[in-house]
């Protein structure tokens, strides 16, 4: 790894393109470094994970609407859309839109947390859609996904967006773009232009994850994927982009992030160095914001020590700055205590999540968020007793340099009416690579089977799993079939809504 220092340059200062961050990301995207077996295995895991959560969300409104928009743009020899027959093909950018929304809807796929937040699995839909449309094989797809993950994780480690109230898609879209460009084996100057344009177009505020959170939370990564494909297309035709997009006098850093005096350091692999950042990412065992994962596991554990939740006087969660301020009471969002709030809001309320997990002893991607569940009288009462605070110990663990020691959990103090206290803590979710029960291939397949049960046929399940597990050797024709098709009766049960398209 090599450190690269980033700062703002005045217009009269010369900054050669080779020294610009976007150019360095472009070099990283197309560098043909070797890929080890464990990295390839994780790429396969991530594709399985994406497919499982996408199919589970097939009938949900945002996913159905995005799919209807995509199907209005058919293309012979285009890309497939999750759930639809493999013979039906659509323009790659619209397939990426539909598939990206499906992957993101349940907030149930992979995550990476550092200086900022990330769902690196969101890079896969636009890369796969482009691979299908342009006849790329399994080896091409693997290299592209690995490059996208490397760019995404590197940016998330180096530059904090949320402190400036910028949504994390500003790191995702350049990574999606780098992945698409890597897939196509483009020259570095073309990739450079496309990455600059992607960043320029992907800046949006964090209001999408604040207060009453809407379905746009699921759409926005898909919007990034669609923009990525279009940015690469324009750059391939010779179009240029705002430059330097990171370091310029009126750039993203100068006016949107740290300001004209800001300095950032980013570490990137050197030419020929293996890209292994995907191994630092982790998936979710539970359908909720990642910082809730360990606390859900802890709630299950503490349930055995609480005989009657009506006897609980208060619940205090000591946790990291991020958890307290994003999904805790530090967010100062009254919507996080509203039983009629949207699902998107509830999955960003650790007060709600911990209460339900403590009462039920399980977590389900639909049942745990159902309106009748959120309005359960005992839950509403318990929910109001939960508060969070930041503890510097947990903030330091959140940012630990060693991935095996990096922690996203907390300490819970439950005080009963009789004055007794039940106290416990958990550093990492059980499914985390350094957790009690790290996810391996069997867990990803089990998650896939659980989420797709009743939605797809057994033969379709076996076909898809068999195909993806042989990813490295798949031909371009086989990549065309890398999709999961739902049962005909499921497909016909989802009625389209009228729009412009």
Image (cartoon, rainbow, N blue to C red):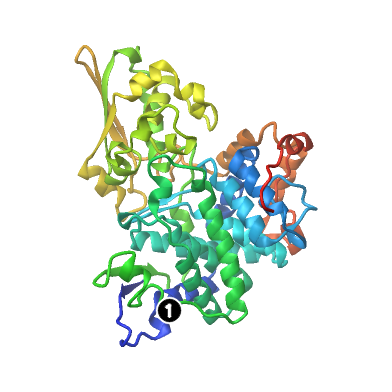
Q: Is residue 495 left or right of residue 106?
A: right
Where 246 sits versus 487, above or below? below
Left or right of 87 on screen, residue 98? left
In percent of width and height, residue 150 lies at 47, 63
In the image, 74: left or right of 438? right
**Image side of residue 159 versus residue 465, left or right:** left
Looking at the rendered structure, the secondary structure element under dot 1 is loop
Closest to the observer, 402 or 100: 100
- Where is residue 188? Give x, y as percent: 53, 80
Relative height, residue 79 to residue 338 (above, below): below
Q: Is residue 52 visible?
A: yes
Task: Report crowding for label 1: few under 14, some 14 to 19, many 20 or more residues within 10 A (C-alpha).
Answer: some
On the image, the x and y values in percent for residue 263 come to: 27, 70
Where, by quadrant of the figure, is residue 49 drawn? top right
Question: Against 1, is 384 above or below?
Answer: above
The percent position of residue 89, horizontal first and vertical second, equals 76, 56
In what quadrant of the picture does the N terminus appear? bottom left
**Mark 1, residue position:** 243
At a point 71% along the width and 51% down the height, the residue shown is 467
Residue 31 showing in the rendered view = no
Q: So how many labels did they put on this image?
A: 1
């Amino acid at each position: 790894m090599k450190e690269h220092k980033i700062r703002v340059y005045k217009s009269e200062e010369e900054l050669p393109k080779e020294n610009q961050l976007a150019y360095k990301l472009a070099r990283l995207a197309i560098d043909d470094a070797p890929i080890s077996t464990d990295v390839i295995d994780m790429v396969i895991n991530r594709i399985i994970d994406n497919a499982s959560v996408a199919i589970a969300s097939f009938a949900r409104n945002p996913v159905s609407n995005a799919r209807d928009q995509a199907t209005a743009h058919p293309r012979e020899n285009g890309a497939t859309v999750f759930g639809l027959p493999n013979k039906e093909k659509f323009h790659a950018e619209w397939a990426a839109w539909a598939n990206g929304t499906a992957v993101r809807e349940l907030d149930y796929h992979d995550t990476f947390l550092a200086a900022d937040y990330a769902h690196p699995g969101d890079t896969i839909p636009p890369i796969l859609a482009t691979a299908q449309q342009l006849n790329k094989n399994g080896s091409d797809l693997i290299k592209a996904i690995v490059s996208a993950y490397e760019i995404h994780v590197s940016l998330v480690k180096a530059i904090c967006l949320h402190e400036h109230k910028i949504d994390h898609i500003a790191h995702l879209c350049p990574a999606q773009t780098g992945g698409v460009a890597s897939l196509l084996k483009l020259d570095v100057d073309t990739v450079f232009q496309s990455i600059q344009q992607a960043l320029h177009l992907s800046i949006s505020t964090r209001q999408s994850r604040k207060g009453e959170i809407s379905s746009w939370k699921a759409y926005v990564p898909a919007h990034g994927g669609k923009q990525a494909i279009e940015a690469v297309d324009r750059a391939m035709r010779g179009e240029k982009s705002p430059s330097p997009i990171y370091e310029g006098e009126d750039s993203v850093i100068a006016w949107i992030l740290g300001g004209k005096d800001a300095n950032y350091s980013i570490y990137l692999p050197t030419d020929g160095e293996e890209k292994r950042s995907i191994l630092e990412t982790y998936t979710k065992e539970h359908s909720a914001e990642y910082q809730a994962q360990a606390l859900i596991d802890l709630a299950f554990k503490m349930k055995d020590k609480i005989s009657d939740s009506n006897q609980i006087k208060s619940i205090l969660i000591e946790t990291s700055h991020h958890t307290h301020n994003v999904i805790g009471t530090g967010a100062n969002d009254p919507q996080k205590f509203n039983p009629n709030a949207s699902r998107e809001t509830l999955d960003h309320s650790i007060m709600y999540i911990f209460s339900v997990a403590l009462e039920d002893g399980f977590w389900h991607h639909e049942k745990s968020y159902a309106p009748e569940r959120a309005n359960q009288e005992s839950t509403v009462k318990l929910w109001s007793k939960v508060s969070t605070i930041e503890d510097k110990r947990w903030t330091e663990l959140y940012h630990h340099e060693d991935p095996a020691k990096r922690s996203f959990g907390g300490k819970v103090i439950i005080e009963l009416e009789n004055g007794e206290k039940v106290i416990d803590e958990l550093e990492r979710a059980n499914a985390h690579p350094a957790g009690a029960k790290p996810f391996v291939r069997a867990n990803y397949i089990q998650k896939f089977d659980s989420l797709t049960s009743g939605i797809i046929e057994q033969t379709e399940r076996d076909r898809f799993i068999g195909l993806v597990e042989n990813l490295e050797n798949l031909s371009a024709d086989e990549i065309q079939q890398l999709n999961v098709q739902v049962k005909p009766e499921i497909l016909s049960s989802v009625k389209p809504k009228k729009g412009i398209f």
